[in-house]
Image: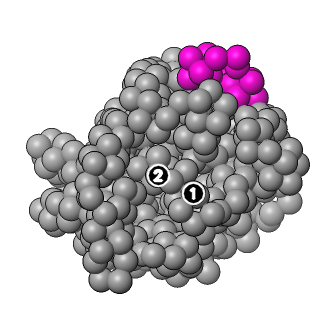
Amino acid sequence: MAISMSGPDMAAELNHGVDAGEAAAHHLAVAARDEPWPSAGAAWFALSVIIFATFLNFFDSAAFGLLIEQIKTEFGLSNTAIGLLQGPVNVVFYMVVMLPLSRCSDIFPRKYVLAIGALLIALLNAAGGFTSTFMALAFTRMLVGAGGGAHAPGSYSMLADFFPPEKRRWPFAVLQLGFIGGSTIGLVIAGKLLALAMSLPETPFMGTTLHGWKYVLLMLALPGVVACVLLLMVPEPPRRGVIEGGKPLPIRAVISEIWRRRAVYGPLFLGLGFSAAHAMAAPAWMVPFYKRTYGWSEVEIATRAPMFMLAGQIAGLLLGPMLIKLLARRYRDANVRAVTICFCGVAPLAILGPMMPSPWLALTCSMLSGMLGIASAVPQNLVIQEITPNQMRGQVTGLYLMMFTAVGALGPFMIGFFTDHVFGHDGDVWKALALSGALLSPPAAYIISRAIRPYADALALLDKETQ
């Protein structure tokens, strides 16, 4: 039997000046399900498949970043143009489809949404390999962003229904292996693929000439088809924590609820956006930075950098849950507090890393920054799943990721713009990276810290309602 839990709306507690009676009228009654949780085997199989699909998303980004200098040379692009290609162009269509796809995750079986997204990315990578103009390539990258928009909301929502709340900490941490593997091991694999592609002859085909980077994009298509098939094999778990009545909320109602709880969601969304701008800029410009600043080739970068990145991110994977557990002994708001600590650690590394006199010191700073970034990802994701009812979960996660992507996409563009129009020389990309780190990372830490107290109040109210 479902148990309805009522009580005053969080807004009455969090947004001072809101009448408690008015807030209570808008309160979401949450129903608990009595069905047993899915088996551990089913849950971990689903997690494994989602990790693989996540790996491919970030593998695609890492591989494309490795190719960017060749693409710049072939099409005669400016730094600003390649910043646009890796940033705003990649998210234009993503922004259009994110909310509809997030809503699909709240309405339809999530495995179908995830599978279609994986297949779409595979087909668009193949299409990118056949392009012969910059505008055509930019169009395929724009649509790849749309495919990626289907992944995260459905993934997190589904996993929250596979694992009980007390067991989510480590699965959500292990999920980061997809990002870690895609951005590190994926870079190594991309380097091998590029070396192979460079040895292949140029081949005229369907009005274009296949060579180098185009072969790599074609090679990226097949794993996406495999991911699509595996996702279709994942069992769809029953939804839990649903709003009374069981129907997904319309987008207008979701936005209204977010606004009422703005004291919690506001700093989370905005702080994540500032952090994302730096987080997306650094890997997007990694190849130009090490190539122009230290003289490394693409293959050298793909061979040397991933080991540092992998070490830092694996350490972050362990640090995140451990930091949450340590803080939880004293603080109910451990998740947001952990994110704040990690963001404070990233700020000096983001500024000083590009200034290092040797590539190895720069890689060390990048390793430590990556460790703290991964450590912060686990509590960030837990916050949304913890305070958001199920029928809002996909859409709220979608809005959260829209902020990550929309503001984050400005990061790669900023580096290109600063390099061209502030410093004026290709070799000054390190200055642009240091400047963006100074402009973005300290504000991210401050803004996210503003969510600590409201988040604690929100959890206290939820505890009261469930008693």
Per the image, the residue denoted by label 2 is 67
Left or right, residue 223 beside residue 117 = left
Verify whether residue 105 appears in magenta.
no
> Does label 1 or label 2 sit earlier along the sequence?
2
68 shown above or below 40: below
In the picture, the disc for residue 90 is: none
Is 241 in front, or is 378? 378
* Residue 275 in view here: no
Percent across and percent down for residue 128 are 40, 70
39 shown above or below 309: below
Q: Residue at x 80, y 63 (%)?
A: 18
Per the image, the residue denoted by label 1 is 73
Q: Residue at x 31, y 63 (%)?
A: 202
The kind of residue tagged 1 is: Thr
Left or right, residue 95 beside residue 208 = right
Percent across and percent down for residue 252 are 61, 80
Is 53 in front, or is 358? 358
Q: Residues within 10 Å of mark 2 (few under 14, many from 20)?
A: many
Q: SS for tag 2? A: helix
Percent across and percent down for residue 154 are 37, 63
The dominant secondary structure in magenta is helix
Q: SS for tag 1? A: helix
Measured Cα–Cα span from mark 1 to mark 2: 10 Å
The kind of residue tagged 2 is: Leu
333 shown above or below 228: above
Q: Residue at x 46, y 52 (%)?
A: 67
> From which residue to which does the magenta span run?
344-365
